[in-house]
Amino acid sequence: MKSKKRYLILLVLLLVAVPVSVLLINLVVDPHGRVLMVNKAGFNRDKLTIKPQSRKAKAAIVRECERDIVILGSTRAEGSVNPGSPAFSGQSVYNAAMKGSSMLEAEKIGLYMLGFQQPDQVFLDLGFYMFSDLRGTAHDFNESPLADKQSLVSILGYLLSPQAFRQSYYTVKFNRAGMSMCDQTGYGIGFPVRGAPLDRIAKRIDSYVSTPSIYGDYKPGDIHYESLETLLSALTAAGVKVHVYMSPVHALQLESIRQLGLMDDYESWKRRVVQITGQINETLNDDQQMTLWDFSGYNNVSMETVPVSGAQQMQWFKDSAANTPAVGEMIAGFLLDAEGRGAEFSPGFGVALNITNIDQFLIQQRQAGDSYAQSGGDEIRLIKEIVAGEYVH
């Protein structure tokens, strides 16, 4: 009887000891960087077991790895602006842009970064859907130190996770071996380019039209404009040179915005960004002034001809919203040397917007959009089918 009782006690102790040991090891090693109770080089500082493009990884790198230039933004910036570009020659660059990011998320990682480092320059890539009222934070954002608060249930689940326990082992192993997460660039190559460009464009626009938080139920989100103002104010106050720009989308994407009746919202987005940057510029010295560059309108890049077959691919676009690295290279060169390399680029690609020219610019863009719609033929009819819900993959 005594031996049975002793066995039961040992079994209970074992059942308690195992999860407690897992919890304590995960708490100390913290492979995802969610608790940061211990953060020691050569032991657990470098979080090498999480996906390099995750928000947790990007938070860890802006915290631990100093850079001359940091790129902020959403999917287009992550997949097109390569830190290894010749335009960045001689400078250390990290791409902290995040897939599907809202402006709120871009603000959070920017402010988080400033708590640990002040890069010389920041590239801030802005997209229309980043300011949608329905866009909030991604799942992995809420499981990162970027979140204002992580739920207790989520933290306990992480600390008791066998997968995290396994990652703790490899985190210590990799750190002791001298491996560094600071070698990561944050650049996301994105999806492979296959098939006919027009098919990819149609599928992308269809997904945007059918997704409420993108175009499907677009409403401007004041919280995102507040985030933009907060981020720009904090960066400039820290002495960071900020390059703000609106990245290009294909003209067929702009046509979908037109046909959805969102052009007023699209123009209002540009006006509000102009207003915010202008107001902040009024508080800055001349050498700190920000120029808001718009690459997103109708121009020789955005109106690139779309091949119907897969035998030929596009130079500037993977689909209607995803830029090729060639665009990122061009924009980086433009912003870093607007009077040199930038002057070689397509006419109208890169317009400096401000309070004095925004009205005339938008009038010209409306006219360009009308002309494009009238001359588009089958491509414009395809967009009409998508917007009407008649497109079949």
Image (tube, rainbow, N blue to C red):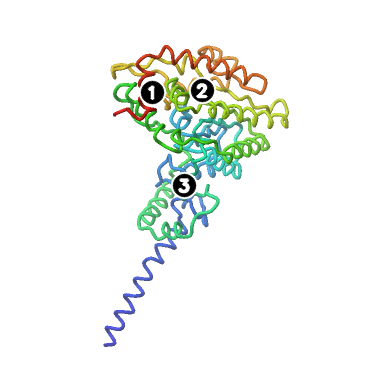
Nearest to viewer (mark 1 / mark 2): 1
- Residue at image location 61% in from the left, 30% down from the top: 272
Which amino acid type is marked by label 1? Answer: Lys
Q: Which of disc 1 and disc 3 is earlier in sequence?
A: 3
Instruction: Give whichever of discs 1 and 2 has the lower sequence position.
Output: 2
Residue type, label 3: Asp
| Quadrant hosting residue 26 | bottom left
State how far apart marks 3 and 1 are (Cα).
49 Å
132, above or below 286, in the image: below
Of the pair 319 and 267, the residue shown nearer to us: 267
On the rendered image, what quadrant is the N terminus found in?
Answer: bottom left
> Label 2 amino acid?
Ser
292 to the left or right of 51: right
**Mark 2 and mark 3: span between their CA atoms?**
37 Å
Residue 303 is situated, as x and y percent measured from the top left of the image, at 44, 16
Nearer to us in this view, 337 or 391: 391
Q: In which quadrant of the rendered view does residue 113 lie?
A: top right
| Circle 3 residue | 46
| Residue 175 x/y as whole percent | 44, 48
Front: mark 3 or 1: 1
Q: Earlier in the sequence, mark 2 or mark 3?
A: 3
Foreground: disc 2 or disc 3: 2
Q: Which residue is mark 1?
A: 384
Q: Is residue 16 left or right of residue 356?
A: left
Image disc number at residue 167: none
Determine crowd level at label 3: few under 14, some 14-19, many 20+ residues with C-alpha closer than 10 A: many
Q: CA distance from mark 1 to mark 2?
A: 21 Å
Look at mark 2 in the image and give the residue it sits on: 296
* 10 Å crowding of disc 1: few (<14), some (14-19), many (20+): some
Q: Secondary structure at mark 2?
A: loop
Which picture quadrant has residue 109?
top right
